[in-house]
Image: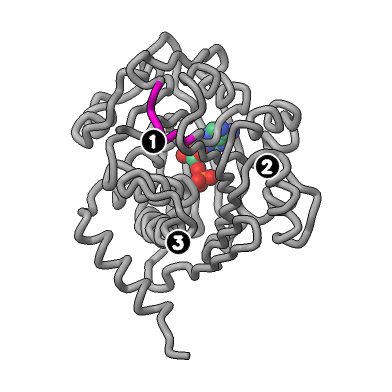
Amino acid sequence: MSILTVGSVAYDDIITPYDKRSRALGGSATYFAIAAQHFHQISLVAVIGEDFNYADEKLLIDKKIDLLGLEKVAGRCFYWKGEYLANWNDRVTHDTQLNVFESFKPKVPDSYRDLPYVFLGNIHPSLQTEVLKQMNGRPKIVALDTMNLWIKETRSDLLETLKGVDVLLVNDSEAQMLSGEHNLMDAARTIAKMGPTTLCIKQGEHGALLVQNDQIFTAPAYPLCTVVDPTGAGDTFAGGFMGYLASTGNLSFENMKRAVIYGSVMGSFTVESFSVDRVAAITREDIDARYNEFVKLTHFHK
Ligand code: AMP
């Protein structure tokens, strides 16, 4: 049983302190799908324009991503231009052009409506809700990613979407902004009242934090990779996290801890190249080898 995902499929112009790349294949759904397909079948709901390259479509096909829900319409693909500042952590958005997403009404194919795993990738919350509404009943697990733009500009839409969400994956400033709480444990308690009873906070080079009721798990980031472009680290983290959960069918907190490590592994591969280059090229053996390194890195005797 596949994972349904909705989100952006985009072309990005990226500037880093050392290099730049134009028209890099990006988008929240693209990064998620390319990462998660290493673990499980993916069914994509998104929209592309006439400028979507055949080579990029072929990559999705070669990765056996189900594209029945990928609409191709007149117009141009979603476009985003971002720049990383010298500290690599601060990112400036220079341009966002919704293009074909402006009039996008997600249509969930009939064959996707009973899927048990749903990942609502970063996109306008009303589109995320539209997907949830078309599902037959409540899926086994719904996870959601969002960003400061939607928390600020479309808060009431987002609060509506969150009512149907189990796991929220955001960074610490987004969790603080959404909850109005500085302390992340207080933020988790406030967010649980909005819907998501599990909060997974991606902290970039500082790792990740998982909170569910009074259970907490903290994981470091992989310290040994070379950062070329941090774009997509959050979406591929979500891909590793959801992909692993779906591949095991086990939603216990213990298993979510392993999923967080698989998420960190996928994020660490993503930042080693522009676009999805690295995360598309790796094998499941590469992923498991890095997972095992994580186990060694975090293991100590009492
Ligand atoms: P991340 O680095 O994980 O935050 O994801 C970056 C990806 O998100 C890029 O490939 C962008 O194309 C995409 N993106 C940027 N802004 C938005 C937005 N407002 N809505 C949807 N996707 C976006």
Report which residue position mark 2 lands on. 148
Label 2 packing within 10 angstroms: few (<14), some (14-19), many (20+):
some
Give percent across and percent down for residue 225. Answer: 37, 68
Question: Image check: 117 left or right of 57?
Answer: right
The answer to whether mark 1 is within 8 Å of ligand 1 is yes
In this view of the protein, which residue sits in the foreground, 47 or 274?
47
In the image, residue 126 sits, relative to residue 82, either above or below, namely above
In the image, residue 149 sits, relative to residue 198, either above or below, namely above
Question: Image check: 2 left or right of 198?
Answer: left
Secondary structure type for disc 1: helix
Report which residue position mark 1 lands on. 30
Question: Which residue: 57% across, 62% down?
Answer: 209
Q: Earlier in the sequence, mark 1 or mark 3?
A: 1
Give percent across and percent down for residue 56. Answer: 28, 31
In this view of the protein, which residue sits in the foreground, 175 or 229?
175
Q: In this rendering, does residue 216 appear at all?
A: yes
Question: Which residue: 70% across, 60% down?
Answer: 184
Q: Earlier in the sequence, mark 1 or mark 2?
A: 1
Circles 1, 3 touching at the beta carbon (< 8 Å) = no
Amino acid at circle 3: Glu
In the image, residue 275 sits, relative to residue 25, either above or below, namely below
User: Alpha-carbon distance for marks 1 and 2?
Assistant: 20 Å
Secondary structure type for disc 3: helix
* Residue depth check, mark 1 versus mark 3: number of the one nearer the observer: 3
Secondary structure type for disc 2: helix
| Residue 254: mark in rendering | 3
Label 1 packing within 10 angstroms: few (<14), some (14-19), many (20+):
many
* Residue depth check, mark 3 versus mark 2: number of the one nearer the observer: 3
The quadrant holding residue 150 is top right
Amino acid at circle 1: Thr
Which range is magenta? 114-119
Label 3 packing within 10 angstroms: few (<14), some (14-19), many (20+):
few
